Image (cartoon, rainbow, N blue to C red):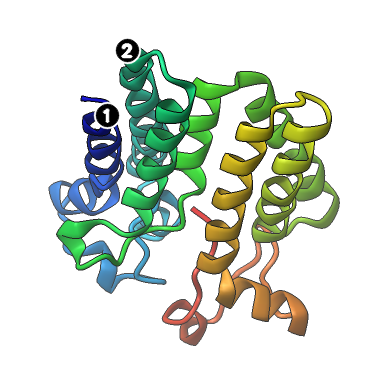
């Protein structure tokens, strides 16, 4: 029964809300727009802000719901594993040939359900970095890199540190193109306009 929670976590995480909402909104396949990502940032490229916000909220909520359901297992490792699989489901959904989003919003949802204070600290780090440097991807990567350190040193929770560390590695892996641009000093800043040719290869954070 416990493994059923983990499977359910993956299935919930793999629901491609961005793809569904874009189609319902009449924008076609979101994977053929902008970066090709199924997350809220790419949905925003349709110009429909409410639709992008709805995608963001649902991607956060599906991660939280997966964890909340797993609470019935009363097993902390099962709960953490369910949260992890929800994030993996978003990144590698079986319905889309394992080509999904970057997991930022879904991770936030799982963190809010598992350890709300850690999630709020991560949001705080993102906000500080985003306002200081105005680079969304760098702000997100910094917050994710800090999460396992905070989980281990402040909350003294080795399992939570391992959980957030694995997710951080996955998020960094999914942000390879962003990291390359950061190293070249070519990552666009928040609010900046991109050239049309950059849209095809750009894959910013969700």
Q: Position of residue 110 (x, y in %)?
A: 47, 31
Does residue 156 appear to the left or right of 158 in the view shown?
right
Q: Are marks 1 and 2 in contact (CB under 8 Å)?
A: yes
Q: Position of residue 54 (x, y in %)?
A: 34, 35
Measuring 37% from the left and 39% from the top, which residue is drawn there? 59
Does residue 18 appear to the left or right of 113 in the view shown?
left
> Looking at the image, how many numbered discs can be counted on the residues?
2
Measuring 23% from the left and 52% from the top, which residue is drawn there? 22
Mark linked to residue 5: 1
How many C-alpha atoms fall within 10 Å of the one at disc 2: few (<14), some, or many (≥20)? Answer: few
Measuring 66% from the left and 51% from the top, which residue is drawn there? 140
Q: Is residue 59 visible?
A: yes
Q: Position of residue 185 (x, y in %)?
A: 77, 79
Give above or below for 109 relative to 144: above
Q: Element type at marker 1?
A: helix
Which residue is more in the foreground, 47 or 200?
200
Does residue 156 appear to the left or right of 28 in the view shown?
right
Q: Element type at marker 2?
A: helix
Q: Which residue is mark 2?
A: 72
Quarter holding residue 8: top left
Measuring 27% from the left and 29% from the top, which residue is drawn there? 5
The quarter of the picture where the N terminus appears is top left
Quarter holding residue 176: bottom right
Quarter holding residue 156: top right
């Amino acid at each position: 029964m416990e493994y059923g929670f983990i499977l359910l976590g993956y299935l919930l995480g793999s629901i491609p809300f961005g793809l569904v909402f874009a189609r319902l909104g009449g924008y076609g396949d979101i994977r053929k727009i902008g970066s090709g990502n199924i997350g809220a940032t790419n949905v925003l490229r349709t110009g429909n802000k409410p639709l992008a916000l709805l995608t963001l909220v649902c991607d956060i909520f599906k991660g939280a719901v997966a964890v909340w359901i797993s609470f019935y297992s009363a097993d902390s490792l099962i709960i953490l594993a369910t949260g992890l699989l929800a994030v993996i489901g978003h990144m590698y959904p079986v319905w889309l040939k394992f080509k999904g989003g970057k997991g930022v919003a879904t991770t936030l949802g799982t963190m809010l359900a598992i350890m709300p204070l850690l999630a709020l600290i991560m949001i705080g780090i993102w906000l500080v970095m985003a306002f200081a440097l105005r680079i969304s991807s760098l702000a997100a990567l910094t917050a994710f890199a800090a999460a396992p350190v905070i989980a281990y040193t402040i909350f003294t929770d080795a399992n939570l540190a391992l959980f957030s560390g694995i997710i951080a590695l996955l998020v960094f892996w999914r942000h390879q193109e962003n990291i390359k641009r950061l190293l070249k000093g070519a990552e666009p800043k928040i609010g900046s306009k991109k050239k049309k040719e950059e849209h095809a290869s750009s894959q910013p954070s969700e």
